[in-house]
Amino acid sequence: MSLHHEFPLMKSWRLIVAALASVCVAAISAEPATAQTSLRGETPLIAEYCQVRYIRKVDIPAEVEGKLVDLPIEEGMNVAKDDLLALVDDTSARLALEFKKAEEKEAQLNAANEVNLKDARNNEELARAEAESFRELYEKGATPYYEMKKKVLEAIRALLRIDLAEMQKKIAEAQYIAKRSEREIAEFELDRRRITALFDGYIEMRIAQLGEWVQPGSPIATLVQLDRVRVGGDIDALASNGVVRAGVPVLVRVFNTADPDQNFEVKAPLGFVSSEVDGQKRYRIWVDVDNQKDSNGNWMIKPGMEAEIIFQ
């Protein structure tokens, strides 16, 4: 083959070799980046066995003995804080309160009464003037000593009566405070017969019946909080080292098995991380989330639903 035909062929091979070398260099240089991307794209840390629970679920008790005369609740009702749930017969408590109010009023009038104190001051002023007059008469020899001495002692006794009147006024004021406290106790006893909701909630179960005789501690109804619920689960202690701590942001996903379109997601700070690792090397954690209602007015998150807590 002549040199004239060899040069173009060699030139072509050189171009092919150069192209292959460029591809290899690019592939080699791309390897670390691929590895780094793989590390950054690790599977997110997800808590196991997560489930929705109540934050507050309380059996509301009766506080006093008596007959239930009002029970305006039914299962499934939403109630607000301080709404009346039941009423124990309060006839005797109301009468006792009226009696204590009357006693308090009497004590208040006695405490404000200054008639005795003013009378004692006036008598002391008169007795003192008489004692001075009899002393002058005695010095002039116009009256015997015992008459003068009698008037002096009467002036001293009048002064003591002022002290007595002041003391009686202080006693009346203290009695008024005591009667006022007794009236407040009577109001408290009347209030104890009104069984009210401790928080905004939902009547999960009505236990008592209208007309039933209840004892202190007898459960009236089960009240649960649904506007805010708790999602709790377990997290691998080894995989979560340094990542899981109270306050870190997490994504909470609640699954509605009956209607997957109603699955619920919300971001919230982690509320609690247990200090104890169980036998399976896991921490217990939970996060509180605000519940929401759907278009029909039903709560979207219900206790017992399965969930996930994802650390982002």
Image (cartoon, rainbow, N blue to C red):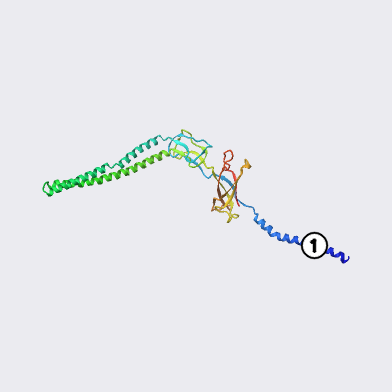
Q: Which residue is outermost to the right?
A: 1
Q: Quadrant of residue 32?
A: bottom right
Residue 95, given in percent of the width and then of the height, sits at 38, 35
Residue 262, given in percent of the width and then of the height, sits at 61, 42
Task: Tell me the kind of residue under disc 1.
Answer: Leu
Residue 239, given in percent of the width and then of the height, sits at 60, 55
- Please report the residue visible at 66 percent of the width from the left and 58 percent of the height from the top: 36
Depth check: give the residue in front, 223 or 215. Answer: 223
Q: Give the quadrant of the N terminus.
A: bottom right
For numbered disc 1, what is the local secondary structure? helix
- Please report the residue visible at 73 percent of the width from the left and 60 percent of the height from the top: 26
Q: Is residue 32 left or right of residue 181?
A: right
Circle 1 sits on which residue? 15
Circle 1 crowding by C-alpha within 10 Å: few under 14, some 14–19, many from 20: few
Q: Which residue is outermost to the bottom?
A: 3
Residue 287, given in percent of the width and then of the height, sits at 55, 48
- Please report the residue visible at 42 percent of the width from the left and 39 percent of the height from the top: 191
Q: Quadrant of residue 243?
A: bottom right
